[in-house]
Structure formats: structure tokens, C-alpha cells
Image (cartoon, helix red, strand yellow):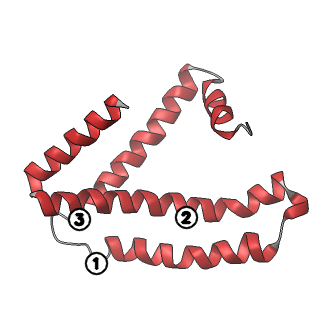
């Protein structure tokens, strides 16, 4: 908790010093928005296969296909409008920060998978346990 709070403070401080308080907050908030929208989109896309695989008796085409698709439409629109037309500096930075963060994430997963066989599965089990 202390490490996360310290990193958050440091990132906010640097953003404020580089872009000013208001623009720094805007850049960080927009970067967070992009990540959040990506996560929600992935959830909406993955929901049908999750229910078909894990809970086939509860699967409903309306609840598990149509509703997520309806939710996906405004999310895709928000994402599109966030990055196109390309905003003026510094609000073009969040798209690049998000791309870098995604690449770092994939790299981290690849590193953990290659170095520690089964450790990623242990982490998945930790977060998906029913307890």
C-alpha cells in the first residue's frame, strides 16, 4: 500500500510539474479512462464465452450477447472520440502512455510465464477463487 501510494504521489507530482495541475490531472484522468474503457470492452467481449463455458445452463443470448454489445457501442465511441481527431498536446499523451502500459503488461506476463511455469496460473487461481 505504501509503495502504491508513493508511486501514485510521484506520478501525480511529475504530471503536475510537467503539464501544470489542471492539464496534469487531465492527462492522468484520460489515461485512466482509456485503460478503464479497454477493460470494460474486454469484459463485454469475453462475457458470452465465459457463460457458454462456465455456466451453460444460465446462458441467455439477450443477457450475455445483446446487452454486452449494447454496452460496447458507447464504450467504443468514447474510446474513438478520446483519440480521434488527435487531441492537442498534452492530451495526445494519454493514448501513447496507454499503449506503452499495455506493452509493458504483455511483456510482464510473457516474462512471468517464461521464467516461472505455473506461477501465472497460481495468480489466476488466487483472483478467481470462490472463497
Label 3 sits on residue: 92
Q: Residue at x 14, y 63 (%)?
A: 22
Label 2 sits on residue: 41
Please rate how many residues cluster around mark 3, counting C-alpha atoms within 10 Å: few if below 14, some from 14 to 19, many from 20.
some
Answer whether labels 2 and 3 touch (C-beta < 8 Å): no
Q: Hey, which quadrant is residue 5 in on the image?
A: top left
Labels 2 and 3: the sequence-earlier one:
2
Q: CA distance from mark 2 to mark 1?
A: 21 Å
Mark 2 vs mark 1, foreground winner is 2
* Depicted 12 relative to depicted 27: above or below: above
Labels 2 and 1: the sequence-earlier one:
2
Q: Residue at x 35, y 54 (%)?
A: 98
Q: Quadrant of the N terminus?
A: top left
Labels 1 and 3: the sequence-earlier one:
1
Q: Is residue 60 left or right of residue 41?
A: right
Please rate how many residues cluster around mark 1, counting C-alpha atoms within 10 Å: few if below 14, some from 14 to 19, many from 20.
few
Label 1 sits on residue: 85
Q: CA distance from mark 2 to mark 3?
A: 21 Å
Q: Position of residue 20 (x, y in %)?
A: 9, 57
Q: Is residue 47 left or right of residue 91?
A: right
Amino acid at each position: 500500500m505504501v509503495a502504491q501510494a508513493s508511486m501514485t504521489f510521484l506520478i501525480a507530482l511529475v504530471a503536475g510539474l510537467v503539464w501544470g495541475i489542471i492539464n496534469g490531472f487531465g492527462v492522468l484522468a484520460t489515461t485512466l479512462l482509456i485503460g478503464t474503457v479497454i477493460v470494460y470492452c474486454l469484459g463485454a467481449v469475453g462475457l458470452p464465452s465465459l457463460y457458454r463455458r462456465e455456466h451453460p445452463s444460465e446462458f441467455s443470448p439477450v443477457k450475455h450477447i445483446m446487452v454486452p454489445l449494447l454496452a460496447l457501442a458507447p464504450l467504443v465511441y468514447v474510446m474513438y472520440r478520446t483519440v480521434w481527431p488527435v487531441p492537442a498536446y498534452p492530451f495526445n499523451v494519454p493514448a501513447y502512455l496507454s499503449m506503452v502500459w499495455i506493452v509493458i503488461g504483455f511483456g510482464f506476463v510473457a516474462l512471468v510465464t517464461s521464467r516461472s511455469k505455473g506461477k501465472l496460473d497460481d495468480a489466476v487461481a488466487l483472483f478467481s477463487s470462490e472463497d
